[in-house]
Image (cartoon, helix red, strand yellow):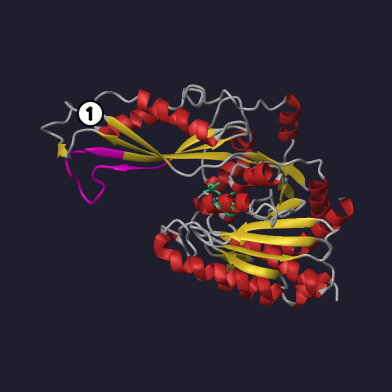
Amino acid sequence: MTREQYIENNQDKFLNELFDLLRIPSISADSAYALDVQRCAEYTAMRLKEAGADNVTLEQTSGNPIVYGDKIIDPNKPTILVYGHYDVQPSVPDELWNTPPFEPTVKNGNIYARGACDDKGQFYMHLKAFETMMQTDTLHCNVKFMIEGEEEIGSTNLGIYVKDNQEKLAADVVLISDTGMIDNDTPSIDTGLRGLSYVEVEVTGPKIDLHSGTYGGAVGNPINVLCNMISSLHDENRRITIPGFYDTVNVVSYEDREAMSKTPFSLDEFKSELEVDDVMGELGYSTIERTGIRPTLDVNGIWGGYTGEGAKTVLPSKAYAKISMRLVPSQTSKEITQLFQDHFKKIAPKSVKVKVTPHHGGEAAVTPTNSAAYKAASRAMEKTFGKKPVPTRGGGSIPIVALFEEVLGLKTVLLGFGLDSDAIHSPNEKYGLFNFYKGIETIPYFYEYFAEEL
Ligand code: BES
Ligand code: MN
Ligand code: MN
């Protein structure tokens, strides 16, 4: 039987198994789901074993378990380390979903569910591609699977695990499907990920909430002050004003920017897709540069004071915000967090107190386009899409990728099949059936070509 036949014959089976995976609400950010996270790891391990992997184990950490399994066919053949994550983002606000987030539903050729694209639908393609190669006797490389449960909360325990298990994880390349491509007719391969600094700030004014008539106008209102402080973090050209913020930013060459400008991209479609009349960002850079090669600062959430029904005249004691900064190569999460912290405290007026608490972070990574692995990925996509993929720079972050390079000395290939319109982290997340099956078809070619190229 050919691989294509095996995939065709097992379409329904593959999808039903993915649905069972999607039904488990493995939300890593919320401890109320700890048992589901555990159950999801067990389910993943069971399926990995069933697909034909050896040494399948749940590697215990001080957080969520890592699912490991491997198949070593010949020590002289190249080894691929497949990484993915079985944890998902919270589904809230659930009322914005058209179908329940953990009851996967197919509509118009798409699977709707939290994690459909990020990353359950994508990592599961690897298990099914592996099963297909096993069943058709076409596995050309050794493979090690490492599917973790803390990507959405920063991969801290995986970082420790990788440092402690360098020999066990030895490989020739890391293969990840946790990014996107331009569209189903325009295959592309991400060649970069941004880093991340994430902080929470607390601004305190008077010791308690006060009557806004008796005291308003005479003491610092922490919400007013916080808004001022936040708006001062960008200048009129939308550049970030934190001193030193850009000091280590790698200048991208004219040639590279030229090449980027040729990436297929329609600003009109981008705007209409998001229902915005105009875009906004750093002066002097195009939209794809703003998300691909430039660092940014965004408020993710802001709260304080009275937000209930009706009106309450109150001068709040406290105001809060969660702020993230996307980083580019050479900026480090630790340094940028420190710069933010120093600056934010410095710009605070004496009438308030400021506390800055850092959350998880991660470093940026760029992947080469001239490696054997990139060539194999490019050939694999060309084979199944009929078009050579274009290299692109993605704006998201996968914190462990930089560590794979630093600790294991391994480069990564980001063979992603998602689309920007898949609404990852948003209500009504989806993943195309086309993308799911196309991924299962493409991945084995990567193995085949990588064995040839290396
Ligand atoms: N799969 C995404 C990262 C991603 C999305 C890369 C789109 C490229 C394109 C990943 O699961 C993710 O969401 N990462 C987080 C970082 C983490 C530390 C919370 C992110 O980018 O916000
Ligand atoms: Mn992901
Ligand atoms: Mn994610």
Q: Amino acid at mark 1?
A: Gly
Farthest residue toward the left? Answer: 214
Q: Is residue 349 left or right of residue 17?
A: left
Residue 106 image-quadrant placement = bottom right
Q: Secondary structure at mark 1?
A: loop
Q: Is residue 245 left or right of residue 217?
A: right
User: Could you tell me which quadrant the N terminus lies in?
Assistant: bottom right
> Pointer 1: what residue?
220
Q: Is residue 427 left or right of residue 189?
A: left
Residue at 82% from the left image edge and 51% from the top image edge: 376
**Magenta-colored span:** 300-319
Q: Judge the density around disc 1: few (<14), some (14-19), many (≥20) Cα neighbours within 10 Å.
A: many
Q: Nearer the viewer, residue 126 or 409?
A: 409
Residue at 66% from the left image edge and 56% from the top image edge: 83
Q: Is residue 23 visible?
A: no
Was residue 282 drawn as part of the magenta stretch in this picture? no
Q: Nearer the viewer, residue 262 or 409?
A: 409
Tell me: residue 347, above or below residue 47: above
Farthest residue toward the right? Answer: 452
Tell me: residue 29, above or below residue 336: below
The image shows residue 360 at horizontal and vertical percentages of 48, 44
Q: Is residue 293 visible?
A: yes
Q: Nearer the viewer, residue 370 or 363?
A: 363
CB of mark 1 near ligand 1 (< 8 Å): no
Was residue 303 drawn as part of the magenta stretch in this picture? yes
The image shows residue 228 at horizontal and vertical percentages of 34, 28
The image shows residue 75 at horizontal and vertical percentages of 83, 60
Number of numbered callouts drawn: 1
Q: Nearer the viewer, residue 413 or 182?
A: 413
Tell me: residue 215, above or below residue 389: above
Residue at 53% from the left image edge and 56% from the top image edge: 150
Question: Looking at the image, in which quadrant does ligand 2 appear?
Answer: bottom right
